[in-house]
Amino acid sequence: MLASWVLLYFFAHAITHWLVGRLLGIRFLFYTVGGTGNPEGYPPVLRWMFEHLPFFGVQTEKQSMQQASPTAQALMWSAGVSSSALVPTLSAFLTWRSHVPWSGPFLVFAIIWGMATLASNWTSRTGDFSKARRALGKS
């Protein structure tokens, strides 16, 4: 249960950036593996760990991003962090619905973690929500 939640947390972000971006006409150059691009969003105890854990990432094609509408850019940026909160939380909910032992307390943890993920990114100057707001400011 914990291992699948961690994998979903680390990989849903980039996959959803790619999926939403491709649906909106944004192209990507390559995939990356590395630490978080938003380390200040994590408490000091976890910051080092999240800077070094293997997050899956994607690199957009510059010309494609420039040609995309501000709304498309904002949706692509927002999709990643939103999925980082929603997909793992949904998996914890489905685990709880399947009556897996200890899944109730874990669901509470997952909900709190998902809310903290959204809140920390919302307040970050370098996070994806900030990039989405800047994209919408171009219109």
Image: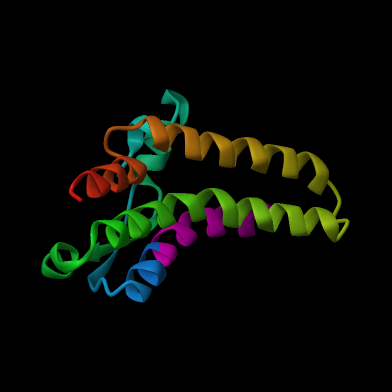
Which residue is more in the foreground, 89 or 82? Answer: 82
Q: Where residue 28 sits: x, y (%)?
A: 24, 71
Q: Which secondary structure class fits the magenta region best?
A: helix
Q: Where residue 75 sits: x, y (%)?
A: 37, 58
Furthest residue toward front: 139
Q: Quadrant of the N terminus?
A: bottom right
Indicate whether 42 appears above or below 53. above
For the image shown, how many numbered marks are present on the structure? Answer: 0
Furthest residue toward left: 63
Which residue occupies 33% across, 71% down?
24
Q: Picture quarter containing residue 102?
A: top right
Residue 5 included in the magenta stretch of the image: yes
Which residue occupies 86% across, 51% down?
101
The colouring scheme, among rainbow, by chain, secondary structure or one colour, is rainbow
Q: Where residue 13 sits: x, y (%)?
A: 44, 57
Q: Picture quarter containing residue 40?
A: top left
Q: Where residue 45 sits: x, y (%)?
A: 46, 26
Which residue occupies 30% across, 40% down?
130
Which residue is more in the foreground, 138 or 98? Answer: 138
Residue 99 appears left or right of 68: right
Q: Where are the magenta residues, as a range?
A: 1-16
Residue 118 appears left or right of 109: left
Which residue is more in the foreground, 56 or 28? Answer: 28
Residue 131 appears left or right of 16: left
Indicate whether 79 appears above or below 42. below
Which residue occupies 37% across, 62% down?
17
Residue 53 included in the magenta stretch of the image: no
